[in-house]
Image (cartoon, rainbow, N blue to C red):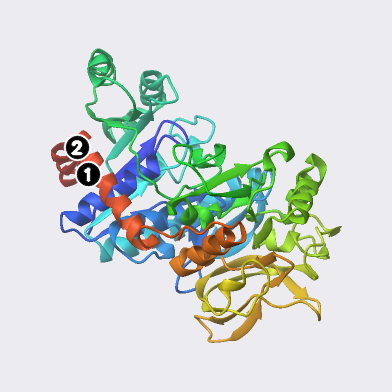
């Protein structure tokens, strides 16, 4: 049976996902067959496995670091927030339903058998399992029914590494307070502390580290620096959403992503950050938009409500104005739905009723209870406008959406694709007048697509410089995982961590 180690944190966004991914990479480099696991993930960035099942992208990223195929057993429960108090609940990759928080908390203990079935499946196939917790284990109002932090550690007999974020301040209080709020049997599971995201002179920190070890009676296994690696982000706490991602070099092209309140799968656009001369920035207010070369409308867990948000804060008008002035507009999934003439929800999947779309494409969307969920591959059809060089380019990606979109007779479809599971072929998406829409998440991850988009935008702007990736996106990600592993090896006591892994609890 697999050995196991668990990474928990003092709060959200302390770096649990990244530390877990780094450990996955280190163990893989050392010759072990490794799998990540997170019993319950709350995130809007999701992925479709080759079986057509939905899981969180954080565990996909960790699986890539571990060099293994992502499978839904690595994330048996995924919660996708639909509003401030409710989420779509996905179990073993399929939609169970939409629930408010109180109803979900009442029933989640009944999902423990599914969680353990998934975990046991991995346990039989791998040498090491790296489990990631969620939020904080010291949420005293939630501990009774916990299935993702100490509750999961107990079920898996997993030793725990507790991570605190020094960059946000108060790391000693974070770590000590978390340990102090745990029950004695929970404290016994913690085998070491990690101080993450440190910047500066480590020697200044040493007296505090000694005091922390004395207070908690736990070793600090490392002080890891703020590592300059580019990895996929789990959710809307991502720092890349705070603004421009390329501030050190001159940008030839300006790409603006609309930061919707319920933005999902914004990882679709990460590939552009690796192209020299391209700036990617996230925009949440009308005055921030300007006239970018390309406006990207991302996916969202609530298309209708986020379109209303754009309408009320002036961003919709700004997008329409920028398009009229020459900006190309590209929508993915929910962003594509917004570009049409109308969105209808007769069965109350989102908000109920209907809403006028942005009117940039002759298309209408009707929401249906059944979620489209599949991997696809195919090619882009002949298209007009600035992105005409995309015509006939091969594409691959995945669909995750509740709506069905029908385009008008005079509107061109964007792609022709084949369902990788059923073999069914169809045309999807729409394009016209420098506006393009598609349901395909990951469409830009093919280097040829991203490079052709950038070169087409550059040509339209009169830029003669040949622009492109310095390496393909898959190779770039592999390099980042190796850099992460190198950084963690240099600052973590891996000998002690291997000892913890061998000894267990």
What is the number of callouts on the image?
2
User: Marks 2 and 1, how far apart in space?
Assistant: 6 Å
Identify which residue is drawn at 81% across, 81% down. Answer: 409
Front residue of 349 and 469 = 469
What numbered label is drawn on residue 490?
2
Q: Quadrant of residue 7?
A: top left
Residue 442 appearing in the image: no
Q: Position of residue 252 (x, y in %)?
A: 53, 49
Q: Are marks 2 and 1 in contact (CB under 8 Å)?
A: yes
Residue 500 appearing in the image: yes
Residue of label 1? 486
Secondary element at image label 1: helix
Identify which residue is drawn at 31% across, 57% down. Answer: 478
Q: Quadrant of residue 113?
A: bottom left
Q: Position of residue 180 (x, y in %)?
A: 38, 22
Secondary element at image label 2: helix
């Amino acid at each position: 049976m697999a050995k196991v180690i668990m990474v928990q944190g003092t709060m959200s966004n302390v770096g649990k996902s990244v530390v877990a991914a780094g450990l996955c990479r280190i163990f893989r480099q050392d010759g072990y067959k490794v799998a990540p696991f997170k019993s319950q993930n709350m995130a809007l960035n999701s992925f479709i496995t080759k079986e057509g099942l939905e899981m969180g992208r954080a565990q996909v990223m960790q699986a890539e670091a571990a060099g293994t195929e992502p499978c839904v057993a690595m994330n048996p429960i995924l919660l996708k927030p639909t509003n401030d108090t409710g989420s779509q609940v996905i179990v073993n990759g399929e939609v169970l339903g939409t629930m408010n928080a109180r109803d979900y908390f009442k029933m989640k203990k009944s999902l423990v058998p599914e969680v353990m079935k998934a975990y046991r499946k991995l346990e039989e196939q791998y040498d090491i399992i790296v489990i990631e917790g969620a939020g904080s284990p010291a949420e005293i109002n939630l501990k009774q029914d916990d299935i993702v932090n100490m509750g999961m550690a107990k079920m898996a007999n997993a030793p725990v590494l507790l991570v605190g974020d020094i960059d946000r301040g108060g790391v000693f209080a974070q770590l000590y307070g978390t340990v102090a709020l745990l029950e004695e049997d929970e404290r016994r599971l913690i085998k070491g502390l990690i101080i993450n995201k440190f910047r500066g002179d480590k020697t200044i920190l040493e007296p505090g580290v000694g005091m922390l070890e004395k207070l908690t009676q736990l070793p600090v296994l490392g002080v890891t620096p703020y590592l300059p690696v580019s990895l996929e982000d789990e959710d809307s706490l991502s720092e890349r959403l705070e603004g421009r991602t390329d501030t050190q070099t001159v940008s030839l092209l300006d790409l603006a992503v609309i930061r919707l309140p319920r933005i999902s799968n914004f990882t679709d656009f990460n590939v552009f950050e690796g192209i020299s001369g391209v700036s990617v920035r996230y925009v949440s207010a009308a005055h921030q938009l300007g006239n970018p070369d390309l406006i990207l409308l991302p996916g969202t867990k609530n298309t209708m409500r986020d379109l209303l948000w754009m309408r009320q804060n002036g961003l919709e008008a700004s997008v329409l104005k920028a398009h009229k002035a020459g900006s190309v507009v590209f929508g993915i999934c929910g962003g594509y739905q917004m570009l049409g003439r109308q969105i209808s929800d007769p069965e109350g999947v989102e908000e109920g009723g209907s809403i006028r779309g942005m009117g940039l494409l002759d298309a209408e969307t009707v929401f249906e209870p059944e979620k489209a969920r599949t991997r696809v591959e195919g090619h882009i059809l002949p298209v007009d406008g600035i992105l005409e060089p995309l015509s006939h380019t091969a594409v691959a990606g995945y669909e995750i959406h509740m709506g069905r979109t029908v385009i008008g007779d005079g509107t061109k479809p964007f792609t022709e694709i084949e369902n990788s599971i059923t073999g069914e072929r169809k045309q999807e998406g729409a394009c016209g007048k420098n506006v393009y829409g598609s349901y395909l998440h990951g469409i830009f991850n093919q280097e040829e697509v991203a490079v052709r988009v950038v070169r087409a935008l550059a040509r339209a702007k009169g830029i003669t410089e040949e622009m492109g990736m310095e390496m393909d996106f898959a190779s770039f990600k592999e390099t980042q995982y190796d850099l992460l592993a190198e950084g963690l090896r240099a600052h973590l006591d891996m000998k002690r961590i291997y000892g913890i892994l061998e000894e267990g609890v």
